[in-house]
Image: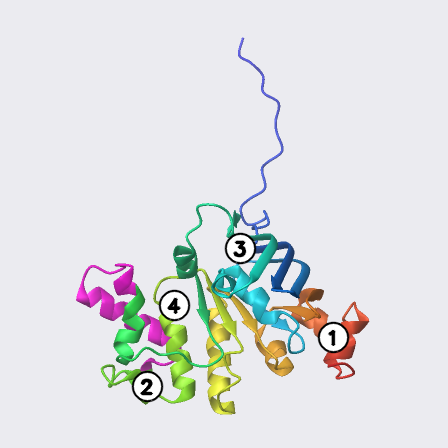
Amino acid sequence: MGCVVEAEAAPRSAAEAPEPPILEVEDLHVWYGGMHALRGVTLAIPRQGLTAVIGPSGCGKSTLLRSFNRMNDRLPGVRIQGRVRFAGVDVYGPGVDPVALRRRIGMVFQRPVVFPMSIFDNVAYGPRIHRLERTARGLAERVERCLVDAGLWEEVRHRLRAPAASLSGGQQQRLAIARALAVDPEVILLDEPTSAIDPVATARIEDTLRRLSARYTIVLVTHNLQQAAHVSTRVAFLQHGELVEYGPTAEVFHHPRDRRTEDYLTGRSA
């Protein structure tokens, strides 16, 4: 007589199961010497979409951003307590290679940073170092794809061998984004990338970020509340090194749960 197996509830489909966050911070404290820059920050950032980090100057926005890919390691006197996880792995754990980590979590800085070489070679630099392409054709296609993704291709396609320094500030910042994309990152960190460029260039970068956020996880530090409201899907508000509020952008901006958030958004507090 065959055995009887009781019917089990059907497992949840992959579409129904919640996807684990790509970045997680748990009770994170960061000190620069005697300065307590972050105080017990805990948050989780989902895959894809754009998370904006807002708050007054000196509140810990850039410190939080740099914690995700260990850029704070470069600073003297830094001390870190707590957990930062990328795809479930503690980035400060033993055996984690910061260089390999920064390939998967790229970064674009406040002021455009271009290498003293051609536009093409700026984008090709990372793929060459990491040997991501075996042929010149493959490398050229990768460079083109990243320049297209960064919204720069049509402006530079006929002068790829020109010095990158010949580009305008806004173009250089989009070139920096293309260079970050060229090594196939999963996360892109941006530290006030439009603060040093004009409004037209800013609008182009914002459009680029909106498009990229459908395929990448983007974390943007910005002092521009209008920018955060327009381009982000989630917002984290920091004040005095503490995470005051974190949630969907529309909810935080229109229905803040904490009075401190409301005061900051309405200009009642700096």
Kindly identify which residue carries mark 1: 254
- Residue 132 location, quadrant: bottom left
Q: Is residue 97 above or below residue 52?
A: above
Label ID, residue 181? 4
Horizontal side of residue 98 vs 258, given as left or right: left
| Badge nearest the viewer, 2 or 4 | 2
The 10 Å Cα crowd at callout 2, few under 14, some 14 to 19, many 20 or more, is some
* Residue 246 spot, x, y in % from top left: 68, 64
Whole-angstrom CA distance, mark 1 to mark 4, is 33 Å
- Residue 106 location, quadrant: bottom left
- Looking at the picture, which amino acid does disc 4 mark? Leu
Residue 108 in sight: yes
User: Toward the viewer: 108 or 4?
Assistant: 108
Kindly identify which residue carries mark 3: 22
* Helix, strand or loop under label 2: helix
| Count of numbered circles in the view | 4
The 10 Å Cα crowd at callout 3, few under 14, some 14 to 19, many 20 or more, is some
| Badge nearest the viewer, 2 or 1 | 2
Which of disc 1 and disc 2 is earlier in sequence? 2
